[in-house]
Image (spheres, helix red, strand yellow):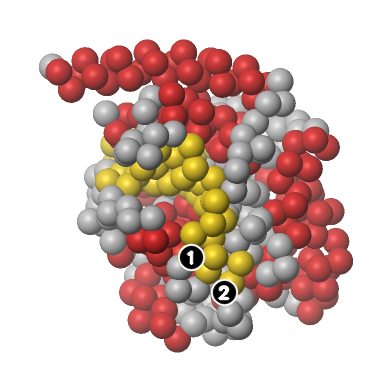
Amino acid sequence: MPSRRRFILKSARLTLAAAIFGHRVALGQTNSSAAIKMIQTDVLDIGYEEHGPTDGFPIILLHGFPYDVRSFDGVSGPLVAAGYRVLLPYLRGYGPTRFRDATPRMGEQAAIAQDLIDFADALNIEKFVVAGFDWGNRAACIASILHPERIRAQVAMGGYSVQDTTTPGRPASAVLESRLWYQWYFNTDRGEAGLEANRHDIIRLLWDTWSPGWTYSDEDYNRSAPSFDNPDFVDVVIHSYRHRHANVLGEQRFLEIEKRLAARPPITVPAIVLRANESGFGPPAQNPTGDRAKFLNLVDRILVDGAGHDLPAHRPDVVVDALLRLLG
């Protein structure tokens, strides 16, 4: 009963904080002016934002492609109000994050997952809760598989997203293939040159098509745009989309890990899966069987109305509620 009482009290505080913070976001007041901190790992100087008490339980929020930490502006405030420490790292190739030396600018899934663990290690964080979408969700899934002792719980936006990068995939339906046009484009020299020359046009097109029901302003885009001018952005993105289709090699240190991930092993940590009902990739499956097979400790699976691919930006309330349930 005491734990339930704490959960109810936290829920009440969260509801109030979410209402206040959501109003601020609606007025265009975000965390975009938050101070950027830097932390060093063996490979990267990682730029990140931090909010909340340093002794609060840590929550790491991971963005995807082509987005940045601004996707979580409506999420971090209510979590801070509930007493949690919120950390928002910029992935490799984004924002202020930089490679420390001449390391090849690679974007394979195992590397980004290792960046997450390295980030936690650098901050002396032994255990944490993680939530992510797109690339961030893939990194969180892999970290949960390889280091379940480090992950207290996970919010998986988009479900299980670990890929078999060792074998080229079979062609999908024409409709699905057309939705993945950017991946085929990035696997050509023309696509690499196009991303270099027209990155902002391409990114805005992806925002439009992946979240067709979401109306955003130039101001909204401009808050994230500098993150895509990172000098390694193009190299990391191109490598990511070529590596996942087995068209380029990854790092030698991840070879055995990628072989293990090719079997797409299940996740055992407590998890809530959030799936957007208005994603430009198509509606989610109504049947939860697939998610139950991959998340063996599935707490809940929620189909989220009013959300496209950038789910935390569209429905931060749902993300916050899922995190609070797992932490309660």
Q: Disc 2 designates what residue?
A: 100
- Tell me the quarter of the picture where residue 237 sits: bottom right
Residue for point 42% across, 19% down: 14
The residue at the point 37 percent across, 28 percent down is: 83
Left or right of 227 in this view: 15: left
**Dot 1: within a 10 Å radius of its alpha carbon, few (fewer than 14), some, or many (20 or more) residues?**
some
Q: Nearer the viewer, residue 226 or 301?
A: 226
Q: The disc labelled 1 sits on which kind of residue?
A: Gln
Label 1 SS: strand
User: Vertical placement of 325 versus 65: above or below?
Assistant: above
Name the residue at 51% across, 28% down.
77
Where 146 sits versus 309, above or below? below
Question: Which image quadrant: the C terminus?
Answer: top left
Task: Give the percent coordinates (x, y) of residue 292.
Answer: 31, 46
Q: Which mark is residue 40?
A: 1
Question: Measuring 41% from the left and 75% from the top, which residue is drawn there?
Answer: 258
SS state under label 2: loop
Residue 97, image x, y percentages: 60, 61
